[in-house]
Image: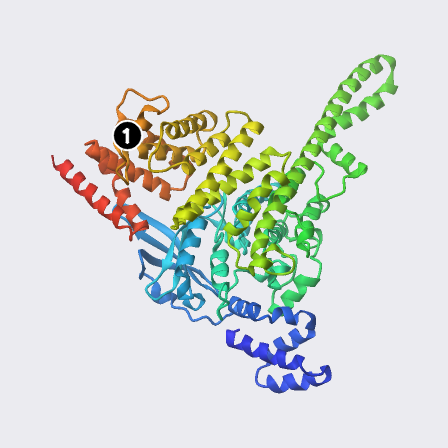
Amino acid sequence: MKKEDWQKIEKIVDEALQLKSENRKAFIKKKCKNSPKLLSEVESLLANEGIVDDFFDSTAVSKYANLIEEEIPTKSEALINKKIENYKILKELGSGGMGAVFLAERTFENYTQKVALKLIRNSFIDSHLENRFLREQQILASLNHPHIAKLIDGGFTENGEPYLAMEYIEGRPLLEFAKEKSLAIRERLELFLKICSAVSYAHQNLVIHRDIKPSNIIVTDDGEPILLDFGVGKILEDEFDSKKTQTNVVALTPAYASPEQLKNISVTTSSDIYSLGVVLYELLTNNLPFETKAKTLSEIIETISKNPPQKPSENYDQSSSLLKAKYLKGDLETIILKSLRKEPARRYSSVEQFAEDIRRYLQELPINARPTTFSYKTKKFYQRNRIPVLAGLLTFVGLISGTTVAIWQAYEARNQAVIANQAKTKAEAETRKAKQEEEKAKKVNEFMKKIISYANPIGDNTGVKYKGQAKVIDALNEMSDKIDIEFSNQPDIQSELHHKFAEIYNIHRGYETNSKKYDEFNSKTKFHAQSAIRLRKKYYGEKHELVAKDMFYLWVSSLDKNETPEQAKLLANAINMMRETNPKNLNLPHMLTAYANRLWSPTVDYVKKTQEIYYQNAISKPKAERLQLAENYYQEAVKIFEEILPKNHGSIVLSKCYLAQLQIDRKKFKEAQVLFPKCSERIKYIPKNKTETERNKKYKKLLEEGLKK
């Protein structure tokens, strides 16, 4: 249905609502006399008058119209083999109301990279929002998780259409993979837990997906799920809703969207939890909790908003030998239905809490979604300890068979009783620990909800005073002093929140051009990093990878033009501690690269005094001279990056480029020749950076001259 049709529907329904109910039927028949389909939609909406006002909110209707528009003009065939910026279009992967997704590639000197290029129709774009659009990309590109597809690039075509280049994942959609591999219930749940870890990570970084569905989850041949389009909805919705344009777009799929999304109420982390619940439901039953096929959008909204979902144990694919009611009944069904509650407050308070109940189910422990009655705990205890319990019963029966046997059986009974008692004690300890973790999760989630509420201008939310225009930095500034108050006796949570605040303030500092604001963000980064270090040591001890991580953040916040031996020692000690506690931590190669930069200065000419300070304070300094040490650090960083990050990730490209340039300075031309193409690859990422471009030309010339000698 076209957008114009929805506009007609809106007008007809609005006029009909002004009439008495007995006069409406004749009125709408007259207005829709040449379009039975139009008449059906209008009648459907008027039959559900209670939700009409929400549905025809001026922002909501335009969003939904764009979402389900079927007759979208497309130029897909004409784009094949054409170039968009640096990308050559190979084929179309899919299309929808927002635009189309293509398989594309960009070729460097000796390397070709494939990407999923999302081309968004320019009807969704306000040309004045280009800067904010590009800035949002930087935030989303910072998401670094093994189960989240990386946002590689983005921008605007010559025609003004925005595009996003995402990491191209080869694999199969979630449901297709589960079916082809004939995954059992346990295997499906273990796969789902990996998906939960990705969503939880993004929520901790204040990013909500908004459109979680099976087709947005690709599973590789190795069985690793990768979430696509993470945060794309945020780029589109936040940017283009800010001016309430006529072409607003919402990133959602009705069958997987939460009731509050369908009603155009504010989206929170709880909306993602609901969508995860629908995905889990379908993964375990091969069916959806609500019937949505052949229904109009208004009927879908009515169904999902008011009707209870069908129980999984009564709505599974009976043709599958793997999916059985006996597996779905009980705790698993309780977990799924809790995630699908109509009211966000009655769902799991965080993705981690959702995942924790699934883990507890897999371990046959009591789940948190059910009251822990004596009979329930006893049943779970028996399920976990069938052998000791049955052995105890057999021992009791054996006692009546004779005196001689009784002595032996008594011994066995005592032995089994000890085992059973130990198991019970362990189970109770696990239950207590889970309760503690649940309380922590609730508190952290409530704290994060307070931050997110700054963007919500409705009701009694904090965002009212900002009229929905609050920035993340506004929320951080107001919530900064409340961390130590709300979590006074929980240093592990305090330290993590201080670290997150330091991280976000540091990102904002990097984009700030106002010197006063820069100093303010710098000071806040330093305060939170110092607080995190103090609390990490209190909770984890003097040596821990998280302590090392925050030492690195403190070093970043303390940088200025005149660097000191104390700063060099701080970074050196952070590197040494990280090597000892977790040499595979992703922060370590970033630390090594930062230290090597000071020893050699790849982008600016540090004074010799600074280079000497870092050389003299390096940990385990070899006999090699300063540039050899820098080369060692770059090589160590590249090795770790390649073990952790996807092939040709931006960090790998940059560190290899710096290593090649350093080798050119050291007259190691043959070694540099292998890595130097990475510098040209980096220029593709930042084509407008004249300094980098000129530097690349300079080293290319030096390399060519060196190879001739």
What residue is shown at x 79% (from left), y 18% (from top)? 414
Q: In the rendered image, is residue 395 in sight?
A: yes
> Mark 1 packing: few (<14 Cα in 10 Å), some, or many (20+)?
few
Q: In the rendered image, is residue 223 in sight?
A: no
Task: Determine whether 307 is above or below 221 in the image.
Answer: below
Task: Determine whether 348 is above or below 633 in the image.
Answer: below
Residue 300 placed where, x, y %?
63, 65
Secondary structure found at label 1? helix
Q: Quadrant of residue 74?
A: bottom left
The quarter of the image holding the C terminus is top left
Color scheme of the displayed model: rainbow
What residue is shown at x 78% (from left), y 34% (from top)? 378
Question: Which residue does the numbered mark 1 point to in the structure image?
Answer: 609
In this orientation, which residue lies closer to the viewer: 113 or 470? 470
Residue 270 placed where, x, y %?
62, 52
Answer left or right for 704 relative to 456: left
Residue 183 placed where, x, y %?
57, 44
The residue sitting at the front extreme is 516
The residue sitting at the left extreme is 709
In this orientation, which residue lies closer to the viewer: 16 or 289? 16
Q: Amino acid at mark 1?
A: Lys
* Count of numbered labels shown in the rendering: 1
Task: Determine whether 560 is above or below 613 in the image.
Answer: below
